Image (spheres, helix red, strand yellow):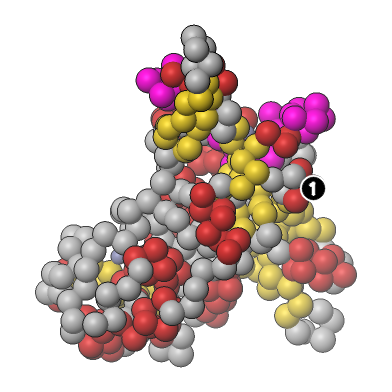
Amino acid sequence: MPLNVDISGLREAVCRMGAESVDVGTIVNLTTTPSLPIDIELGTGIKVDLSEVKTDNGLLSYQGRQILLYIQDHGDRIQEVLENEDEGNKFHIAYCRTLEDMQSQGRFERYVATNDLTGNFFITGFDGGNGAEREGGAYLKVCKNCLTKLNYQGYYDKHEARFQIFTDFDLEKFFCAYSSFFPHMPSRRAGAFDGQYTQDWREIAMLYKESKNFICEGCGVRLEDHRRLLHVHHINGVKTDNRQQNLKALCADCHRRQPRHGHMYASHEDMKQITALRRQQNLINLNSWEDVFKFADPGVHGVLHHLQHHHPELPEIGYEVKNDGGAVVAELELAWPSRSWGIAILPADIKKAETAGWRVTPVHEAVDMQATLL
Ligand SMILES: [Zn+2]
Ligand SMILES: [Zn+2]
Ligand SMILES: [Zn+2]
């Protein structure tokens, strides 16, 4: 029976595919591919050298994988922290002011890199009385400077919502929001695969998609030629409840925006494909900021929150930059064609658009509050 496999690999497979699109045959193929040593190591945490940590679009990365950093050693404070996790060291999700300071002080080597998204951090220290070594797990909190740096969920601009954004911070959701920035997804994650499908799910899902003519019931994008990008979602979350009224055909992007689907990843390629099809099919009608948030990659939402506060003009989404011959040379996440200005994620897009005469701001610079966007 194919489901009788190592659950960690299965989780990863489900994450990459978008849970409900996975069929039994696919699971077998993906789980026989072993995780790379680097993924296993990052799951438990690696002490990293500063020179090895890269910043991609303001986020932290290690060998192409998105990571977070924290100081494992809590010294003689460990007992206090194990009793009250709010007192623990904050973990970092971006190259924030704190890390910049630490780096300039040469203290960076004390950090541990991990992509374990359970939120339960392994911490160490010693007993202040007898000096005995202590260790344990603690649910540490996110660094507020990181939230500011990324303007995560509008943290910087929405003063009144800051406390809520901080306390509700969820690692799984965070990594998923930026999944299109990284080629590799984390291998250890919290409760992503919590349901079982019925044996006939593959067939039911196929028939259901067919009955909807391979059109997303969320945004209306037609995916008959890109069926991989169309999932079948269980509205009540019960994956064995296959009644027609409990099913919904959703594109990978609409699907991950459903409640309790913060764990669902979408690659940059998939997002680009869906956006391009929506544009071709005239489905992107931007009349308000709400519309812009709906259609834009969640990875640029930090920029959007900032723009919304300061910029009256709505951007275009997934704008295709063409050369003199009319061929598409680059795609911009956000663009203001009248100003020949755009914001992009991938360095290749930035370079090519600039060659075609555009001014392009990388997303991390655009979100940086020091940068003048206007
Ligand atoms: Zn930070
Ligand atoms: Zn859709
Ligand atoms: Zn679903």
**Residue at image coords 42%, 54%:** 189
**Residue at image coords 77%, 84%:** 326
**Residue at image coords 22%, 68%:** 196
Please determine whether, in this image, residue 220 is positioned above or below residue 158. Answer: below
**Which residue position is annotated with label 1?**
51
Residue 50: image location, x then y, percent: 76, 43
| Placement of the N terminus among the 4 image quadrants | bottom left
Q: Is residue 231 left or right of residue 316?
A: left
Name the foreground residue: 70 vs 244: 70
Please determine whether, in this image, residue 72 is positioned above or below residue 43. Answer: above
| Placement of the C terminus among the 4 image quadrants | top right
Residue 173: image location, x then y, percent: 44, 50
In which image quadrant can residue 74 be found? top right
Please determine whether, in this image, residue 329 is positioned above or below residue 118. Answer: below
Say if the magenta span includes residue 98.
yes
Q: Identify the amino acid type marked 1.
A: Ser
Residue 291: image location, x then y, percent: 47, 56
Residue 102: image location, x then y, percent: 74, 29
**Residue at image coords 79%, 47%:** 51
Tell me how many marks there are: 1
Name the foreground residue: 328 vs 189: 189
Q: State which region is magenta.
A: 80-107
Say if the magenta span includes residue 280.
no
Q: Is residue 289 left or right of residue 326?
A: left
Q: Is residue 209 left or right of residue 112?
A: left
Residue 357 visible to the viewer: yes
Residue furthest to the top in view is 129
Helix, strand or loop for disc 1? helix
